[in-house]
Image (cartoon, helix red, strand yellow):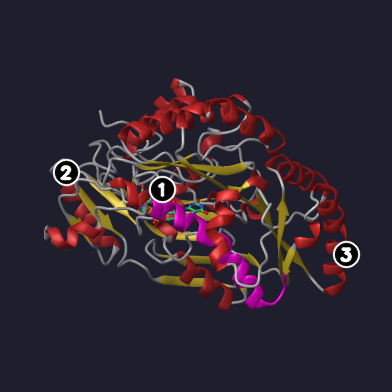
């Protein structure tokens, strides 16, 4: 069994996440194999020692950080085991970096669709454990839609292998377990350590263009999204939103992209097509919609060449990283980035934006950065709280918006998970018996309660 590392200099890196949140890690395991994981978990269960699995700590909810006990990093278990092109299935170890996994799949002529903005900074195992999604979920769904099977070392050290049935029809017991691999998706390390992942793959789109459309007000940007969602019958891969603050963040790097000085919002969308005639037909549908919703239609930027597309993609992707850097800056003074993760049916987005305007006064001059997956009804409102007092205020606004989202048929967390920062919101989402059923599941797989303490549930 690998020895537990206790060198404080090594531990420091494993004690901090992308937001700059620090934990109380007291040891580190870096297993090379599943049998190492089994030995580590068994020994921790026997000694009632807490263990938190870690990918690359890009989680935005404190989930990867150890509230108590040791970290188990999967970074050394990063093998791509197989790509079966005929069956369109890939098998990998959890520590593989998502962008590297996606690249290998592409080289084999296929696509692994989930595409969180953090692809270069997160692992496939972390994606499974948080049910990561991202911009292209609009067309392709979230990680849960692609996981076919898993091997998990549960909190007793037992290997549990789960495979979803390959047929659609199923009537064996409770519906919640018809696709048993899904039981572990979103479990945030609380049920065990995922050691092997089977995912389905799909065909790569033949071509894709990106567009950036600018708006003079938020309302028009949302109207555009709603109408595009309802009228454009070929679903774009993504429809993303940046607010005025984000436009100022990207302006210095915009190189060649003229961002109108009076733009208050931008919608970025990705449209797939097969050939030039289909591209023209699709552009011909998009342009009237753009012209209808914004007087800035002539400023629309379309990227078609790989270089142009990369530039637009990188610009959009720069925003979350910059926002997280703001969080790291304020951590020392007791602050943090508080980010909403609610989502609502896209038709109801106006109500959530209007509700925010009603309740935002206590935020005062706190920096508010809004961007995200508006096409999926899922924008992130990021509040950069500069101290403890502002953090409490921002959390309250986040909770109020989460309550409103659930009341309108949405959810409290659409992609980042509950972790430690959204535990209060679990009870907004589910009635007590459902929360109790999740706790019972945890007791089955982790009777000693050693796995990922403080994630999803308060430590009891
Ligand atoms: C700049 C930036 C952009 C982001 N954009 C997106 C986005 O577009 N969409 C999105 O969904 N998320 C996004 N995220 C959040 C984050 O990248 C995801 O939550 C990601 O899935 C975490 O992966 P990770 O490998 O870093 O896992 P970690 O952060 O290390 O861990 C996350 C959780 O997974 C558990 N875990 C990790 N590996 C395992 C394992 N093998 N077995 C069991 N449990 C495990 C941990 O215990 C923890 O609870 C972004 C983050 C950043 C920093």
**Mark toward the start of the polypeptide (2 vs 1):** 2
Q: Nearer the viewer, mark 2 or mark 1?
A: 1
The answer to whether residue 86 shows anywhere in this view is: no
Q: In the rendered view, tell whether residue 426 sits above or below residue 378.
A: above
Question: Which quadrant is the C terminus positioned in?
Answer: top left
Query: What is the C-alpha distance between the residues marked 2 and 3?
Result: 61 Å
Asked whether 247 or 25 is in front, the reply is 247
Asked if ligand 1 lies within 8 A of label 3, the reply is: no
Q: Which mark is residue 60?
A: 1
Q: Residues within 10 Å of mark 1 (few under 14, many from 20)?
A: many
The answer to whether mark 1 and mark 3 are in CB contact below 8 A is no
Segment tinted magenta in the rendering: 303-326
**Mark toward the start of the polypeptide (1 vs 3):** 1
Asked whether 294 or 443 is in front, the reply is 294
Query: What is the C-alpha distance between the residues marked 1 and 3?
Result: 40 Å
Check disc 3 and report its element: helix, strand or loop: helix
Query: What is the C-alpha distance between the residues marked 2 and 1?
Result: 25 Å
At x 30%, y 52%, the residue is 53
Residue that lies at the very extreme toward the front in this rendered image: 261
Q: Which mark is residue 281?
A: 3
Question: Which quadrant is the N terminus positioned in?
Answer: bottom left
Asked if ligand 1 lies within 8 A of label 1, the reply is: yes
Check disc 1 and report its element: helix, strand or loop: loop
At x 44%, y 30%, the residue is 426
Q: Is residue 317 magenta?
A: yes
Q: Which residue is mark 2?
A: 49
Query: Does the magenta stretch mainly form a helix, a strand or a loop?
Result: helix
Question: Residue 130 location in percent, x, y?
Answer: 44, 48
């Amino acid at each position: 069994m690998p020895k537990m590392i206790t060198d404080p200099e090594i531990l420091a890196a494993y004690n901090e996440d992308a937001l700059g949140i620090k934990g109380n890690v007291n040891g580190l395991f870096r297993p090379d194999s599943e049998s190492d994981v089994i030995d580590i978990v068994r020994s921790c269960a026997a000694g009632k020692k807490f263990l938190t699995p870690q990918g690359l700590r890009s989680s935005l909810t404190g989930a990867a950080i150890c509230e108590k006990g040791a970290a188990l990093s999967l970074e050394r278990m990063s093998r791509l085991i197989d790509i079966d092109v005929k069956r369109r299935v890939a098998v990998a170890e959890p520590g593989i970096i998502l962008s590297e996994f996606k690249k290998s799949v592409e080289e084999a002529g296929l696509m692994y669709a989930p595409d969180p903005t953090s692809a270069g900074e997160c692992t496939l195992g972390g994606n499974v454990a948080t049910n990561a999604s991202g911009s292209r979920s609009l067309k392709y769904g979230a990680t849960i839609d692609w996981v076919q099977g898993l091997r998990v070392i549960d909190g007793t050290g037992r290997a549990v292998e789960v495979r979803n049935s390959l047929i659609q029809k199923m009537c064996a017991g409770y519906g919640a377990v018809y696709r048993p691999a899904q039981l572990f998706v979103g479990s945030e390390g609380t049920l065990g350590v995922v050691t092997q992942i089977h995912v389905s793959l799909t065909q790569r789109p033949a071509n894709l263009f990106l567009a950036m459309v600018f708006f003079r007000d938020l309302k028009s940007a949302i109207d555009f999204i709603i109408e595009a969602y309802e009228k454009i019958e070929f679903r774009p891969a993504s429809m993303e939103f940046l607010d005025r603050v984000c436009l100022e963040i990207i302006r210095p790097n915009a190189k060649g992209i003229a961002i109108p000085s009076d733009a208050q919002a931008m919608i970025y969308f990705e449209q797939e097509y097969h050939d030039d005639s289909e591209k023209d037909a699709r552009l011909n549908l998009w342009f009237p919609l753009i012209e209808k919703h914004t007087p800035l239609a002539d400023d629309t930027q379309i990227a078609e060449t790989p270089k142009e597309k990369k530039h637009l993609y990188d610009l959009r992707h720069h925003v979350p990283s910059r926002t997280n850097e703001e969080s790291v800056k304020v951590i020392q003074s007791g602050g943090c980035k508080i980010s909403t993760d609610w989502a609502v049916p896209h038709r109801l987005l106006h109500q959530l934006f209007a509700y925010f305007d009603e309740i935002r006064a206590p935020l005062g001059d706190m920096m508010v950065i809004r961007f995200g997956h508006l096409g999926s009804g899922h924008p992130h409102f990021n509040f950069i709280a500069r101290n403890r007092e502002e953090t409490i205020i921002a959390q309250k606004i986040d909770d109020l918006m989460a309550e409103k989202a659930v009341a309108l048929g949405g959810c409290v967390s659409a992609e980042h998970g509950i972790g430690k920062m959204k535990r209060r919101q679990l009870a907004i989402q589910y009635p007590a018996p459902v929360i109790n059923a999740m706790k019972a599941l945890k007791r089955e797989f982790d009777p000693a309660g050693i796995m990922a303490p403080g994630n999803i549930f308060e430590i009891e």
